[in-house]
Image: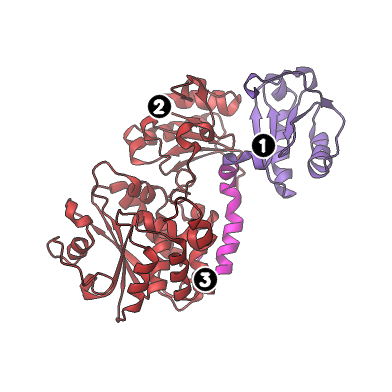
Chain colours: A purple, B red
Amino acid sequence: MTKIKTLADLKKMKDELQAKVDLREKGESAESYVQIKVGMATSGIASGAKQVMDFLIEALEKRNIEAVVTQTGDMGYCFAEPTIEVKKPGEEPIVFGYVDIKKADEIIEKYIKQGELVEGIIPVNYQVIDDK
Amino acid sequence: MAKYKMHLLVCGGTGCRASASDSVLEHLKKELEIKGLQDEVQVVMTGCFGFCEKGPIVKVSPDNTFYVRVEPKDAKEIIEEHIIKGRKVTRLLYQDPEKKEAVSDSKHMDFYKKQIRIALRNCGLIDPENIEEYIARDGYAALGKCLNELKPQDVIKEIKDSGLRGRGGGGFPTGLKWEIASKNNADQKYVVCNADEGDPGAFMDRSVLEGDPHAILEAMAICGYAIGATKGLIYIRAEYPLAIKRLKIAIDQAREYGLLGKNIFGSSFDFDLELRYGAGAFVCGEETSLIHSMEGLRGEPTIKPPFPAEKGYLGKPTNVNNVETFASVPIIIRKGANWFNKIGTEK
């Protein structure tokens, strides 16, 4: 309801509001952002994946990292839940296991920000048929 | 501000509404409340997605899942399966007719693959009844740029260089039309938007007006600045009640936020506009008939010259443009003429 008196007012309002609709635009071109999928099947939820997902969304926003966080089904690594798959643009996706909030923080700081691999990686042991 | 993890975009275009998309929206909201998720998932009614044959459309962000033919009774399953459990509801996904497989992301659908949405950039992505969502996507930044950084002649040059041509069918170079109107001096000039869209079955203009009404308001203000007009009129056919409703809401909101009215962006430029309704005459889509209809006379074409840019509404210089033409103006100003004229064919 505030009146916009100058172009600077408009810019300020836009910056404040952008976060609200950003999510939709990011979804359109997700490949250019860091994509994180959090396993939220029964085993994931039972191990606290929801808190990890909430933490990731908040932390990435606070640290100004452009990312799309979505939930996915069971990735098969129930023994290592919570698991998350992180795909940086142009790179192969990596699955991390035993991700609690502390680990998630480490993954953001080390892998996402600096490309440094962190402990707890689950190696790729499957092939997706529609990649062919 | 509640941090929404997911957005459910429900198509609110006339086509989908005729198939009860507003009921779909109500059911989705209700289901979310039952599950206590109303603060985590936002449900928004947007403009037309364009895929009307398969409506009602529901799009889930950010994973970009595109559900088609969604019925109100499907709301429970979408919430329980997709939102809570993360499993897409396969039976509601679009089935590619040739490959016979489900396509989840609209980017991979043949219908959307080759589209670069310019005039429709916001349709399907924002709530057209909320000016803040328009602002969040760079709304009114083009108007601000014009009033703060460009002179009227610069604006006209930009539109001329972009190669934008009248999208109502005439294909007359828009920049040239604006230039002619700006050169004719008078104490009052007018900007008119032709939203009559008489062609049977056509709904391009309707989609823009229903899905992104602010784009038209912004463009008309930019035109007013360029040609020296302080008043705008939108001539819209009465058969578009939803578009009329959304335009009314948009105009009120724009006035409230100071983006229409006096001294816009602190400059000396005033601009305001009003709606005029058609009454079912196909001929009133022709600009001179349209003008006479607005003057309260019989909608009858008159000989040109003189063209409206010289002598139009109430005998004053008037610039008439189609909805789709106007829809392209703000983004041309923002991204530049060179960006626009690289797209499409040479002319």
Residue B215, how many percent across, how many down?
43, 57
> Which residue occupies the extreme right position in the image?
A119
Question: What amino acid is found at the position of numbered circle 2 in the picture?
Answer: Glu
Residue B346, how many percent across, how many down?
45, 54
Are dots 3 and 1 in contact, CB under 8 Å? Answer: no
Numbered disc 2: what chain? B
Numbered disc 1: what chain? A
Above or below, B179 relative to B249 = below
- Which residues are the magenta region? A1-26
Residue B35, how many percent across, how many down?
55, 29
- State the predominant SS element of the stretch in magenta: helix
Which label lies toward us, 3 or 1? Answer: 1
Q: Quadrant of residue B251?
A: bottom left
Q: Which residue is tagged 3?
A: A5
Dot 1 crowding, Cα within 10 Å, few <14, some 14–19, many 20+: many
Mark 3 and mark 1 on one chain:
yes
Query: Which of the image's four quarters has the C terminus of chain B?
Result: bottom left
> Which residue occupies the extreme front position in the image?
B346
Q: Which residue is tagged 2?
A: B71
Residue B207, how many percent across, how many down?
37, 46
Q: Callout 2: helix, strand or loop?
A: loop
Question: What amino acid is found at the position of numbered circle 3 in the picture?
Answer: Lys
Residue at x-position 40% and y-position 35%: B51
Which of A6 and B193 lies nearest the eye of the viewer? B193
Residue at x-position 46% and y-position 61%: B162
Q: Callout 3: helix, strand or loop?
A: loop
Q: Which residue is tagged 1?
A: A69
Dot 2 crowding, Cα within 10 Å, few <14, some 14–19, many 20+: some
The numbered mark, 3 or 1, whose residue comes first in the sequence reads 3
Question: What amino acid is found at the position of numbered circle 1 in the picture?
Answer: Val
Above or below, B265 relative to B330 = below
Numbered disc 3: what chain? A
